[in-house]
């Protein structure tokens, strides 16, 4: 690992005065939360920050889990395990608890934070190994080794010729489906954005996020309601634990007499960024939730998928994952 400077930030406003250049994959200043992504990538020589700003002291003020009639407010410094194990999250927002408890390992979940989780980097093997010269995400303009190389895990939705990296997280897929918001503190004060605006679309792969330089994520805000209560996260992976998704679906249903009043659908393991399938949601409204309607919605959700050989299996796997998730959610007591 290369030498780097270390600083502690005792409050979010102070942390925000460090110009992290957060949107860039490899910014010169990086925040350190649980360190389970950052330190890994520094050891691999993928991330080479000159300075690391330790935001773990913010746990004192930004790790609370607050449940109100309006919704859920999750401090960004809360650990994945604290949220996954919280009884009111498990009861009122099952998809959130499941997305976190099915991720990584118990040790990692005890260390990793929600803020770091949503900003984790792709697991594309060419990104994580600097001995490959072609990677637009690591080295802008160098090309994309995955497109003609090994791309079994790579994305099929929201990709373009510059990058087919898969967004690897689980929790972010649920936040996208639920229409959550993100609370940010920066040198200009506090602001809220829709979670769906946090990750950039494909086009400039070296730019990951829309945070302003130095902005710190302090909380996630999730609306309450029928969708959140009747929700689940289904994760398909190569082995049953300690593995990233090759396909996943976050679904939430508001049903009346078996007919869909509202539906929410997020897809993971498939897309360049946390993916919400709004056209598929709209196709379900006003219809009974059956195998036929779920299947038609899944066809819409996977429309436009682009594969590159090794990942040709993904559209069908994604389709089946979504159908199963919708049918399971329809059977839930809510
Ligand atoms: P850090 O490593 O500290 O930070 C990550 C990035 O986010 C850094 O760039 C940092 O600057 C930035 N950052 C952190 N907090 C903030 C903030 N509050 N505001 C602004 N920027 C911030 N994840 C899954 O979802 N599913 C899995 O199945 C899964 N499996 C894994 C398996 C392994 C072996 C490993 C190592 C990781 C796995 N992960 C998985 C990823 C893991 O969940 C993330 O590494 C973790 O959540 C990152 O959180 P952290 O607090 O450690 O972030
Ligand atoms: Fe790099 Fe993206 Fe191509 Fe992977 S898919 S090699 S991250 S440019």
Image (cartoon, grey):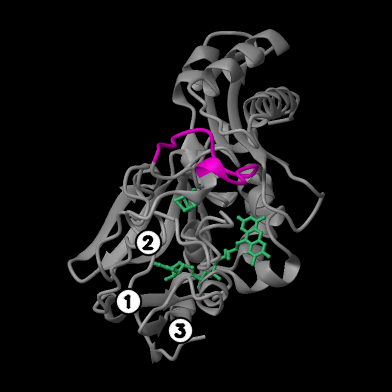
Q: Secondary structure at mark 1?
A: loop
Q: Is residue 53 left or right of residue 33?
A: left
Q: Secondary structure at mark 3?
A: helix
| CA neighbours of label 1 inside 10 A, class few (<14), some (14 to 19), many (20+) | some
Boundaries of the magenta span? 147-161
Ligand 1 within 8 Å, label 3 CB: no
The reply to whether the C-beta atoms of the residues labelled 2 and 3 are less than 8 Å apart is: no
Q: Earlier in the sequence, mark 1 or mark 3?
A: 1
Query: Height in image: 317 above or below 209?
Result: above
Q: Is residue 262 visible?
A: no
Find residue 139 and name its label: 2
Find residue 57 and name its label: 3
Mark nearest the camera among 2 and 3 is 2
The image shows residue 174 at horizontal and vertical percentages of: 55, 43
Q: Secondary structure at mark 2?
A: loop
Quadrant of the snapshot with the C terminus? top right
Find residue 114 and name its label: none
Give the spatial CA distance, label 2 vs label 3.
33 Å
Q: Which residue is mark 1?
A: 28
| Residue at the far right in the pictured view | 240
Q: Residue at x 59, y 31 (%)?
A: 252
Mark nearest the camera among 1 and 3 is 1
Mark nearest the camera among 1 and 2 is 2
Q: Residue at x 66, y 58 (%)?
A: 84
């Amino acid at each position: 690992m290369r030498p780097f400077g270390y600083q502690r930030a005792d409050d979010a406003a102070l942390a925000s005065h460090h110009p992290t250049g957060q949107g860039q994959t490899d910014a010169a200043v990086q925040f350190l939360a649980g360190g389970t992504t950052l330190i890994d990538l520094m050891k691999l020589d993928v991330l080479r920050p000159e300075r690391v700003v330790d935001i773990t002291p913010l746990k004192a003020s930004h790790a609370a889990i607050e449940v109100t009639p309006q919704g859920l407010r999750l401090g960004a410094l809360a650990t994945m395990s604290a949220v996954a194990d919280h009884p009111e999250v498990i009861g009122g927002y099952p998809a959130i608890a499941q997305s976190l408890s099915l991720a990584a390992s118990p040790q990692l979940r005890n260390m990793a934070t929600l803020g770091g989780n949503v900003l984790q980097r792709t697991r594309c093997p060419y990104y994580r190994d600097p001995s490959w010269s072609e990677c637009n995400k690591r080295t802008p303009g160098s090309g994309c080794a995955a497109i003609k190389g090994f791309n079994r895990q790579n994305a099929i939705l929201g990709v373009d010729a510059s990058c087919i990296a898969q967004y690897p997280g689980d929790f972010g897929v649920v936040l996208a489906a639920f229409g959550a918001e993100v609370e940010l503190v920066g040198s200009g004060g506090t602001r809220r954005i829709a979670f769906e605006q946090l990750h950039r679309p494909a086009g400039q792969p070296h730019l990951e996020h829309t945070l302003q330089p130095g902005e710190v994520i302090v909380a996630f805000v999730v609306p309450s309601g029928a969708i959140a209560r009747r929700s689940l996260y289904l994760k398909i992976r190569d082995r049953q634990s300690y593995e990233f998704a090759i396909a996943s679906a976050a679904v939430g249903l508001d049903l009346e007499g078996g007919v869909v009043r509202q539906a929410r659908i997020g897809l993971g393991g498939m897309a360049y960024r946390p993916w919400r399938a709004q056209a598929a949601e709209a196709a379900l409204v006003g219809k009974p939730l059956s195998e036929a309607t779920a299947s038609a919605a899944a066809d819409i959700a996977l429309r436009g998928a682009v594969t590159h050989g090794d990942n040709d299996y993904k559209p069908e796997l994604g389709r089946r994952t979504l159908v199963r998730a919708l049918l399971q959610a329809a059977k839930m007591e809510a």
